[in-house]
């Protein structure tokens, strides 16, 4: 009987830990190794665009396509760095000149809008995760995002009018709105005094 109760308790604790981890990721080497290239590219894209605002130009001009294999190599060759945040690894790579910036045209959110979102269905969850990591790290926006990134990705897709069965479909009146601005529409609502 005691063993059954311990097994149930262990199951409940494991499920709770998994739920907490899914909603508050530590975007580190363990996460990087547990996810795939599409999610990496999305995360880097979201993080780069978010950190490219005028006050934080640390990653401006760097491409997720040049950074992704370098970050993968970094974690693969340094198993002891598994707890190091992805953002810290990217900064290390940039400072060590392991990657070079690309020329980018346009402003702060250039091309990172509904049209981009429509074209990268497999990277969408990663994009949201990158934005959320940036927002948390730099404390950009008051409020919180307590839902899983996949839920926000689905909400953003609906807002843009993207049809998963027809990649050509999008709401033309909303297509030019930056992804980050759309994501901010879905942050948690503050609770009133009696809530």
Image: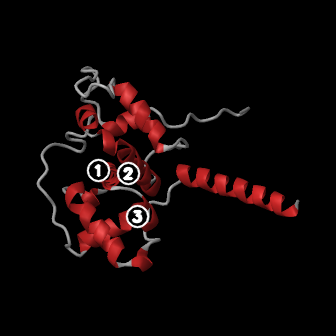
Which residue is at 66% across, 57% downward? 14
Badge 3 element: helix
Pointers 2 and 1 in contact (C-beta within 8 Å): yes
Label 2 and label 3: CA atoms lie apart by 16 Å
Which residue is disc 2 drawn over?
130
Pointers 3 and 1 in contact (C-beta within 8 Å): no
Q: At which x and y percent is residue 27? A: 44, 60
Q: Earlier in the sequence, mark 3 or mark 1?
A: 3
Label 2 and label 1: CA atoms lie apart by 7 Å
Q: Nearer the viewer, residue 115 or 56?
A: 115
The coloring applied to the image is secondary structure
Which residue is disc 3 drawn over?
33
- Specify few, some or many for label 1: CA neighbours under 10 Å numbering under 14, 14-19, or 20 or more: many
Which residue is at 26% across, 59% downward? 59
Is 123 situated above or below 178? below
Which residue is at 25% across, 68% downward? 70
In which quarter of the view is residue 88 placed? bottom left
Badge 2 element: helix
Give the number of the disc on residue 81.
Answer: none
Which residue is disc 1 drawn over?
45
Q: At which x and y percent is residue 132? A: 43, 48
Q: At which x and y percent is residue 153? A: 41, 37
Is 11 situated above or below 163? below
Q: Nearer the viewer, residue 176 or 120?
A: 120
Can I make out residue 39 in this image?
yes
């Amino acid at each position: 009987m005691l063993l059954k109760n311990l097994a149930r308790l262990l199951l409940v604790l494991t499920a709770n830990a998994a739920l907490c981890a899914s909603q508050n990721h530590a975007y580190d080497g363990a996460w990087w190794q547990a996810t795939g290239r599409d999610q990496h590219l999305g995360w880097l894209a979201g993080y780069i665009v978010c950190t490219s605002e005028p006050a934080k130009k640390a990653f401006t001009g760097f491409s997720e396509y040049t950074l992704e294999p370098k970050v993968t190599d970094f974690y693969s060759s340094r198993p002891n760095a598994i707890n190091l945040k992805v953002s810290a690894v990217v900064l290390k790579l940039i400072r060590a000149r392991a990657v070079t910036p690309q020329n980018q045209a346009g402003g702060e959110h250039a091309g990172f809008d509904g049209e981009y979102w429509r074209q990268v269905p497999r990277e969408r969850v990663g994009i949201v995760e990158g934005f959320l990591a940036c927002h948390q790290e730099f404390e950009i926006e008051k409020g919180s995002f307590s839902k899983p990134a996949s839920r926000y990705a689905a909400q953003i897709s609906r807002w843009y009018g993207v049809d998963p069965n027809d990649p050509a479909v999008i709401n033309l009146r909303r297509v030019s709105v930056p992804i980050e601005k759309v994501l901010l529409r879905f942050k948690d609502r503050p609770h009133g005094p009696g809530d």
